[in-house]
Amino acid sequence: SPARITVDPTFVVGEVDPRLYGSFVEHLGRCVYTGIYEPEHPTADEHGFRADVAELVTELGVPILRYPGGNFVSGYRWEDGVGLRESRPTRLDLAWRSIETNAVGTDEFCTWTRRVGSEPMLAVNLGTRGADAAAGLVEYCNHPGGTYWSDLRRKNGVSDPHAVKVWCLGNEMDGRWQVGHKSADEYGRLASQTAQAMRLVDPGIELVACGSSGPRMPTFPEWDATVLEHCYEHVDYISLHSYYQERKGDRASFLACAVDMDRHIEAVVATADYVRAKGRHTKRINLSFDEWNVWYSQGTTVERAWEQAPRLLEDQYNVVDAVVVGNMLISLLRHADRVRIACLAQLVNAIGAVRTEPGGPAWRQTIFHPFALTSRYGRGVVLQTTIMSPHYETDWFGEVPVLDAVVLRADDGVTVFAVNRHQHESLPLTVDLRAVPGLRRASHTYIGGEDPAAANTGAEPGRVVPLTGEGLAVDAGELAVALPPMSWNMIRIS
Ligand code: AHR
């Protein structure tokens, strides 16, 4: 069948929650140290944070930032990271076999986050700690004053509360690699008790329970159901994590991994709704897809000396990865009614959208571009859209559509995000806009190009950038456009 999208503003999936465009800062490798923070860097501000990185983070458009882990949080004592720097202990970080100086902690991170126009989303340690430490951290961050922890924050120079709204109850607690990993019953009970204690400190917070750490975990989705049975009434979201990579040169499957993301999301929605029905609950649990990306490098904890800020997981992304990341954003948007928060993992250096060199440049990886454009223009409401497409066969997912797309409506017009998964042929697409009268002009921006392996580097930071397609016009309510081979596309119609 030919590729055709029929737009009708009557049928709405849901309004986009800007927190869908979140990212993630973990004490991992060089994400924090020599990533966002490097007091010796020529661009460092008076707080030691790199201004060049802050500028890119603002451009990326990340309204929420998860912190401080990740696996790191499961051995973290948050108290180590507050107060006078010279008194902060240096510790072994068991998750990433690294030396942690604690030079950056909760106060520095939350304050920096606000400076870059974002809000913090903090995780508490449910690996080696529990309700007491978590409730103490909420009190430290959110209580105005007059108590031990809130007065400590004030003494540490932060007079106004950080007002942290969203909190993660631990991280990937089903994973054997997690310090203090637990069974679903153990974790579910702990999450429930911790959630209740945290909410007693601040009833206005929102809480995310750990779902399975991936759809291929043997306990998925049983883990998610059991955990929610323990804590349904005390949490607001269940988390999803997923990473993809091109395996054994099977690019055709890799290009379609958003199909897997769709299935993952739909399975977790079904699981949460099953627990809702079973427990006779009325509220719905929404989804926080708080780790997602393309991830190649593996193996981090073995046979390495203990080092401070080691180079870990510093994947260099290419054009194909950017197309896939753009497609994953389409998948998240398509489920905007239930996925309310999502975090690209991660922000800087470690599987990061931004890369840096110590003392040197900061640059945009290829995946930065579809993310920044979707965050900027993927606002308004997501429409239920009919998409017709030719199909192709993949080893991982069976038959999949060549075209994947999502359509949004905002006050200034209609935006189509679309991926052509065909590796060699461009895809002629018709967008039927007859149900939205008055649209005339359109612009076409895309990521693609001759060399799928092209990447950005410190020496050549502008090798892969968004390209501009031909000017397009709406003719008799229809728009015709050719999507280049293996490309991510944004078409803005007004
Ligand atoms: O994002 C990198 C790591 O991936 C996180 O620390 C962990 O939660 C996941 O396994």
Image (cartoon, helix red, strand yellow):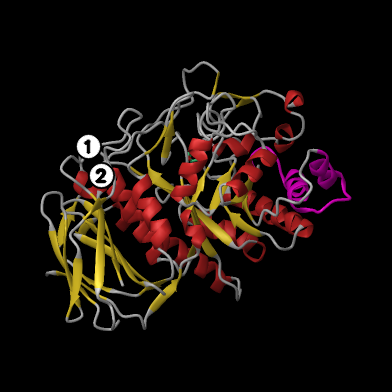
253 lies above or below 362: below
> Residue 100, how many percent across, how many down?
62, 26
Residue visible at 76% across and 55% down in the picture: 197
Which three-letter amino acid code belongs to the residue tagged 2?
Answer: Val
Mark 2 C-beta closer than 8 Å to ligand 1: no
Say the numbered circle drawn on residue 105.
Answer: none
Which three-letter amino acid code belongs to the residue tagged 1?
Answer: Ala
Task: Look at the image and give the residue range highlighted in magenta.
Answer: 126-155
Disc 1 is placed on an element classified as loop
Q: Quadrant of residue 280?
A: bottom right
Q: Quadrant of the N terminus?
A: bottom left
Q: Is residue 56 left or right of residue 446?
A: right
Say the numbered circle drawn on residue 320.
Answer: 2
- Count of numbered marks: 2
Q: Nearer the viewer, residue 133 or 475?
A: 475
Residue receiving disc 1: 453
177 lies above or below 323: above
Tag 1–tag 2 contact (CB < 8 Å): yes
> Residue 153, how many percent across, how many down?
79, 43
